[in-house]
Amino acid sequence: MSQVLDGKAHADRMLEEVRQGVEARLAQGKRAPALAVVLVGDDPASHVYVRNKTAACAKVGIRSLEHRLAADTPQAALDALIDQLNADPGVDGILVQLPLPQGLDAKRALHRISPAKDVDGFHPVNQGLLLEGLPGLRPCTPTACMSLLAHHGVALKGLRAVVLGRSEIVGKPMALMLLEQHATVTIAHSRTKDLPAVCREADLLVAAVGRPGLVEGSWIKPGAVVVDVGINRVEDEALGAAIFAAEPKKLETLRAKGGVLCGDVRFGEAMAVASAVTPVPGGVGPLTIAGLLANTLAASNQDA
């Protein structure tokens, strides 16, 4: 049986470090860091994420400034708000919650945020700094995943890593961070030939494609470390029967409640093969918020 990599416990450790960093600022007579969150529309999942981020801010002493806009807000109004927040010296970090309603250009909004306040790490300037291995605000999820691996003593040097997914949010930056730590990295995706065989080459497999239960136990090299970034909701019982064959309790929950969360990896099958696996929920999800607040603290300290 493999080890469960507890993302919640590690997120708590990261948040405690942020809390101590905020206290150190206050002891120096500086103000508390401030994170501005822009929420457009009424996407239920976005509201949950923002609520969780606000609660986490309160725990560590970061001021959370919420800006809620109607779903029919024009792009020009969103741009104007971002410009206002960029110019506000009392705001250290700006987060535009995705997805945006139809008709709004997410990349235009993200690229408008000042790189110094881009706590998501999505701005081309920060992505470029990552590419060159220079200091900057880095994407929260892969940064926190790297922290989790380091905490558990996963030696990355010389390791064969496969990153399944090529997004600018997780896949590409994760690959760069692993490469920075001297892993040999392959980025795989939906058009990769013989994807299961490529995944089986991995000593470290990072799955970030947003497809429930895509990675079967047979895709995993015995003894590999598996980081599951996917967070998916499964409501179809036939699909659940296939991907939860090794997790009968999860299948029972699906049948009882009509839906259940799962990752991109079939957790029960992975636990029988891998040396360590992140669960869903309770794995990478809490780490992302911790990484966001660590970036907010780092952005505030740029005024030092």
Image (cartoon, rainbow, N blue to C red):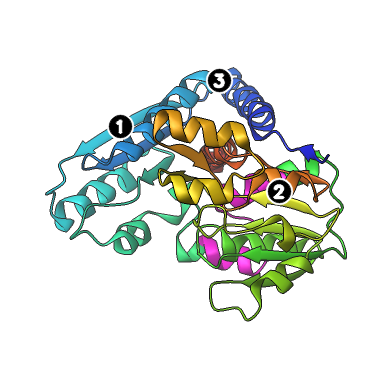
Q: In the image, is residue 141 part of the stretch drawn in magenta? A: yes
Q: Which mark is residue 269?
A: 2
Considering the numbered disc 1 on the image, is that residue within a helix, a strand or a loop? strand
Q: Position of residue 243 (x, y in %)?
A: 57, 50
Q: Are marks 1 and 3 in contact (CB under 8 Å)?
A: no
**Could you give the CA–CA distance between mark 2 and mark 3, rounded to whole angstroms?**
48 Å
Q: Position of residue 264 (x, y in %)?
A: 57, 53
Mark 2 is surrounded, within 10 Å at the Cα level, by few (under 14), some (14 to 19) or many (20 or more) other residues, namely many
Q: In the image, is residue 52 part of the stretch drawn in magenta? A: no
Considering the numbered disc 3 on the image, is that residue within a helix, a strand or a loop? helix
Q: Position of residue 86 (x, y in %)?
A: 33, 48
Disc nearer the start of the sequence (2/1): 1
Residue at 54% x, 22% y is 60
Residue at 57% x, 25% y is 22
Instruction: Give the quadrant of the C terminus.
Output: top right
The vertical placement of 140 against 210, above or below, is: above
In the image, what residue type sits under mark 2?
Glu
**Could you give the CA–CA distance between mark 2 and mark 1, rounded to whole angstroms?**
41 Å
Q: Which residue is mark 3?
A: 26
* Left or right: where 74 falls relative to 188: left
Q: Which residues are magenta?
A: 126-147
Disc nearer the start of the sequence (2/3): 3
**Could you give the CA–CA distance between mark 1 and mark 3, rounded to whole angstroms?**
22 Å
In the image, what residue type sits under mark 3?
Leu
Res 203 → quadrant:
bottom right
Q: Which residue is mark 1?
A: 66
